[in-house]
Image (cartoon, rainbow, N blue to C red):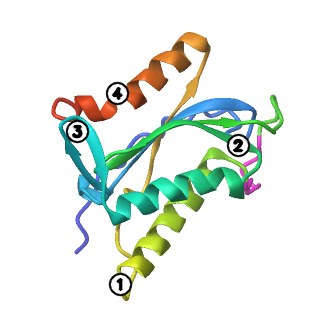
Amino acid sequence: MKKHQPRRPNRRLRDHNYASVGTYFLTLVTQNRAHWFGRIVQGDMQLNNNGCIAHEAWQATANIRPEISLWAFVVMPNHLHALIHINIGTENEVPTKFTSPKKTIGAIVRGYKGMVVRQIRAANQLESSPKVWQANYNERIVHGKTAYQNIRYYIQTNPQRWEKDRLK
């Protein structure tokens, strides 16, 4: 019998178009917070091969999706923090529940996660796809310059805070 997992509340804003122009702070966490991507040594992130894949795949996301700009990001042993900006979109359009927008934050995250899993599978010569990521992700809409600067600082200094804040 399958163990019942408590359902996380949906924190996405009901009337927000996640394909609209804007800046978003994303956190993607590995399944069971496993250290897939490397380790922290004296406050510096040391990427392993999987971490290099995750880092390069995030950078490639902007080449694949010209509608976005990638700003600050850090790959940590068990998560990724990133600031992303959607450059092209409809500011006030609310998508219907029957559409499947390909340029939403959700589609960008799904594409990135899938790319990382496929590349890790190939690089490690695995027969099946590994469970790298938690099913969901966290995002926050960034409002204003001060919020952007605070989040950027948080991302840039995340490795130095690893011992205190390792997403336990």
Disc number at residue 21? none
Q: Let me know if residue 29 appears in the view.
A: yes
CB under 8 Å between callouts 2 and 3? no
Which tag is nearer the camera, tag 4 or tag 3?
4
Other-residue count near label 4 (Cα within 10 Å), few / some / many at <14 / 14–19 / ≥20: some
The amino acid type of the residue labelled 3 equals Arg
Q: CA distance from mark 1 to mark 2?
A: 32 Å
Element type at marker 1? loop
Quarter of the image where the N terminus is located:
bottom left
| Kind of element beneath mark 4 | loop
Q: Are marks 4 and 1 in contact (CB under 8 Å)?
A: no
User: Helix, strand or loop at disc 3?
Assistant: loop
Amino acid bearing label 1: Leu
Magenta segment, prevailing SS (helix, strand or loop): loop
Most extreme residue toward the bottom is 127
x, y percent for residue 10: 48, 40
Q: Which residue is mark 4?
A: 157
Kindly indicate the quadrant of the structure image that contains residue 15. Answer: top right
Which residue is denoted by mark 1 in the rendering? 126
